Image (cartoon, rainbow, N blue to C red):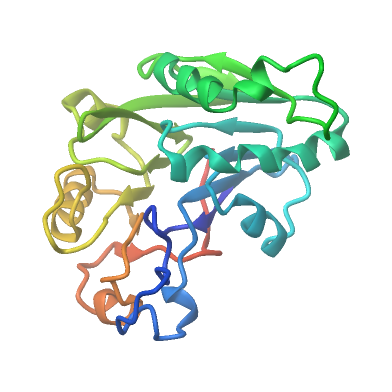
Amino acid sequence: MQIMILGCGTSTGVPVPACICSVCRSGKEKNIRTRTSALISAENGTQILIDTSSDFRQQALRRAIQRIDAVLYTHYHADHILGLEDLRGYNFAQQGPIPAYGTQNTISEIRRCFNYVFEPNPNYDGGGVPQIETHLIDDTTPFEVKGFLVRPFQLQHGLTVVTGYRIGEMAYATDCKILPEATYETLTGVRVLVLDGLRYEPHKAHLTIPEACAVAQRISAERTFLTHMTHSIDYDDVSAKLPAGVELAYDGLVVDFKY
């Protein structure tokens, strides 16, 4: 299997509108970060999306994504869900609904934000709405998606509980400040880890780069990729300072892993 990082930027994306900092003005391809999401692809053609970021349409077009078989939602913050509307094209192409998985809190907030999708007005005469089948999960019980076992785990993102996902030897852990002990147990044996690493300056809801490196060292994955980064992170400058085994993600990064 493989994971593609569709977006590795924080909620503003990078460049940030109206910002004139050196990173936003650098023009470096790896400093251009759309909002955070990822795509997992299997050899049999199955494609599982993690979050419908607010930049999903742009990501889907740029990466020529031809199908989405399921969506795994980490949490309900705007930058991770607002691209749900752009799943419509896949409904048209695939002639059917797309299953979406998330915890009770996450799915409830998505259904509230997109009430016109889940509680359609029979008098509405505009274009079609996305066809999404929601499936409730908890963050401790493994479940199956299109024949693949998914192991969810809990992350603490300020006051918000976020769901991370492990598939085979890969784990995806965005938007977090604290990893509970049970989560470290779930991550035992992971070889590819995608992990929140916002910036160097402290933040109450996100891991800093040094904190993320400490987490990566404890988990001992062969390769850890930091995501959800701000415009204070210059790809080349920060990459040169990272310890062995820790790298910065970038939009379009593809990493193979074993299921």
> Would you say residue 146 is visible in this rendering?
no
The picture places residue 85, in percent across and down from the top left corner, at 67, 38
The picture places residue 231, in percent across and down from the top left corner, at 32, 69
Q: Is residue 208 left or right of residue 115?
A: left
Name which quarter of the figure residue 126 lies in.
Answer: top right
Name which quarter of the figure residue 162 lies in.
Answer: top left
The picture places residue 30, in percent across and down from the top left corner, at 45, 75
> Which residue is nearer to you in this view: 179 or 161?
161
> Would you say residue 17 is visible in this rendering?
yes
> Which residue is nearer to you in this view: 26 or 39?
26
Q: Is residue 98 left or right of residue 250?
A: right
Looking at the image, residue 196 lies above or below residue 246: above
> Which residue is nearer to you in this view: 46 or 109?
109
Q: Is residue 134 left or right of residue 193?
A: right
Picture mark count: 0
The picture places residue 45, in percent across and down from the top left corner, at 75, 42
The quarter in which the C terminus is drawn is top right
Task: Identify the residue at image location x=68%, y=54%.
Answer: 60
Task: Identify the residue at image location x=78%, y=49%.
Answer: 66
Specify the farthest residue to the left.
Answer: 202
Looking at the image, residue 77 lies above or below residue 215: above
Looking at the image, residue 55 lies above or below residue 144: below
Task: Identify the residue at image location x=19%, y=75%.
Answer: 241
